[in-house]
């Protein structure tokens, strides 16, 4: 069974952006919101990948006995 190569997840500071109706037209604010959303998605997928790798290891260990 081939394992996926693991890389250390990059450390990203959690940021919270509060957007009100008045400042949604600012291009800088929209770019910051999109960047935060992309980082959240990357962290979510990385966590899922590591979890499923861990599950497959446990599955393989279970069948080795």
Image (cartoon, rainbow, N blue to C red):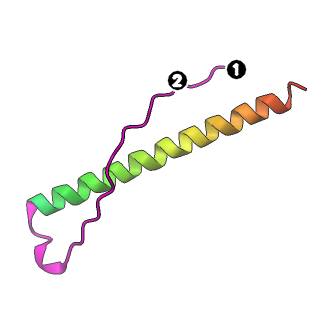
Tell me: 55 left or right of 30: right
* Stretch of the chain drawn in magenta: 1-27
Front one among 41 and 14: 14
Q: Which residue is mark 2?
A: 5
Which residue occupies 10% across, 58% down? 28
> Residue 62 lies in what quarter of the image?
top right
Q: Is residue 55 above or below residue 19?
A: above
Q: Residue 5: percent from the left, percent from the top?
A: 52, 23
Front one among 1 and 10: 10
Tell me: 42 left or right of 25: right
Q: Residue 12: percent from the left, percent from the top?
A: 33, 46
Tell me: 59 left or right of 5: right
Q: Mark on residue 1?
A: 1
At numbered mark 2, what does the secondary structure look like: helix, strand or loop?
A: loop
For the residues bearing labels 2 and 1, Cβ distance under 8 angstroms? no
Q: Is residue 57 magenta?
A: no
Counting other residues with Cα less than 10 Å from the Cα at mark 2, is it few (<14), some (14-19), or many (20 or more)?
Answer: few
Q: Which is closer to the viewer, label 2 or label 1? A: 2
Q: Residue 43: percent from the left, percent from the top?
A: 42, 47
Tell me: 39 left or right of 23: right
Q: How many marks?
A: 2
Q: CA distance from mark 2 to mark 1?
A: 13 Å
Residue extending furthest toward the top: 2
Counting other residues with Cα less than 10 Å from the Cα at mark 1, is it few (<14), some (14-19), or many (20 or more)?
Answer: few
At numbered mark 1, what does the secondary structure look like: helix, strand or loop?
A: loop
Q: Mark on residue 54?
A: none
Q: Is residue 25 above or below residue 7?
A: below
Q: Is residue 16 above or below residue 48?
A: below
């Amino acid at each position: 069974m081939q394992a996926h190569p693991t890389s250390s997840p990059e450390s990203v500071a959690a940021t919270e952006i509060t957007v009100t109706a008045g400042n949604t037209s600012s291009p800088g604010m929209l770019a910051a919101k999109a960047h935060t959303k992309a980082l959240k998605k990357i962290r979510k997928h990385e966590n899922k990948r590591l979890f499923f790798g861990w599950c497959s290891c446990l599955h393989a260990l279970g069948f080795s006995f």
